[in-house]
Amino acid sequence: MTRLGPLLRNAERLAMLWLYAFIVVVIVVEVLRRFVFDYSSIWGEEAARFAFIYLVWIGAAVGVRNRSHIRFTILADLLPPRGATALSMLGNLAIMGFAAFAFYWSIEPIETSLRFGSVSEGLRLARAWFLVAVPIGFTLVFLRAIGVILEDIANFRANQPPSTGEKLFD
């Protein structure tokens, strides 16, 4: 298990890297096919679009783990360390609640797609393979929020402020 530790710790980042590289390659190939060979395929655009959907949902989970989502910190900045940490835990509980709600409501479209056998237009794959990106993404968000809350609990006990992600703007 120790050999897999770094791989599991960076699995989301690795998946995002591969998805992003796939999107770039497919789009470059499709641009060349369209403008050099005057021919394009429907599968390329569709494959890139669905890979992007997975990339976004995995990125949302990474954003929760890194605490890099947009947030307003004016209230947390005014509170003592324990209060700021408690506020962070409350926010992450809200994220978990929303993720559970979204997960629940994302299952029905998958069931409907499977029931009627819908397929994607270009790839001719079951549309359920692409719709399942939403519950996978919200499951990852939920799990990452649990990890952040556990970190917040440790900070709360140590009377430390919550960890902060990297700021995009200062």
Image (spheres, helix red, strand yellow):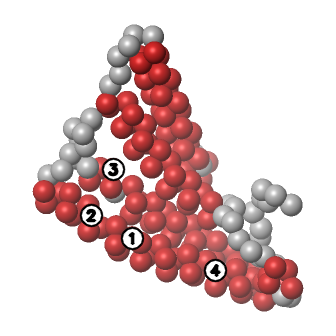
For label 2, the residue is: 109
Where does the image place residue 89, in percent across and percent down from the top left? 66, 82
Q: Are marks 2 and 3 in contact (CB under 8 Å)?
A: no
Dot 4: few (<14), some (14–19), or many (≥20) neighbours within 10 Å?
some
- Residue at image position (40%, 60%) is 134
Q: Amino acid at mark 1?
A: Phe
Decide which of tag 2 and tag 1 comes sooner along the chain.
Answer: 1
Q: Quadrant of residue 114?
A: bottom left
At 59% from the left edge and 47% from the top edge, which residue is drawn?
A: 13
Asked if residue 80 shows in the view, the reply is: yes
Q: Quick one: label 2 or label 3, which is nearer the N terminus? A: 2
Disc 1/disc 4 C-alpha distance (Å): 18 Å
Q: Which residue appears at 43% of the width and 76% of the height?
A: 100
Residue 9 placement (x, y as % from top left):
59, 53
How would you rate the neighbour count of disc 3 (Cα within 10 Å): few for under 14, some for 14-19, many for 20 or more? some
Give the amino acid type for the residue marked by disc 4 in the picture: Gly
Judging by the rendered image, the residue that carries numbered circle 3 is 130
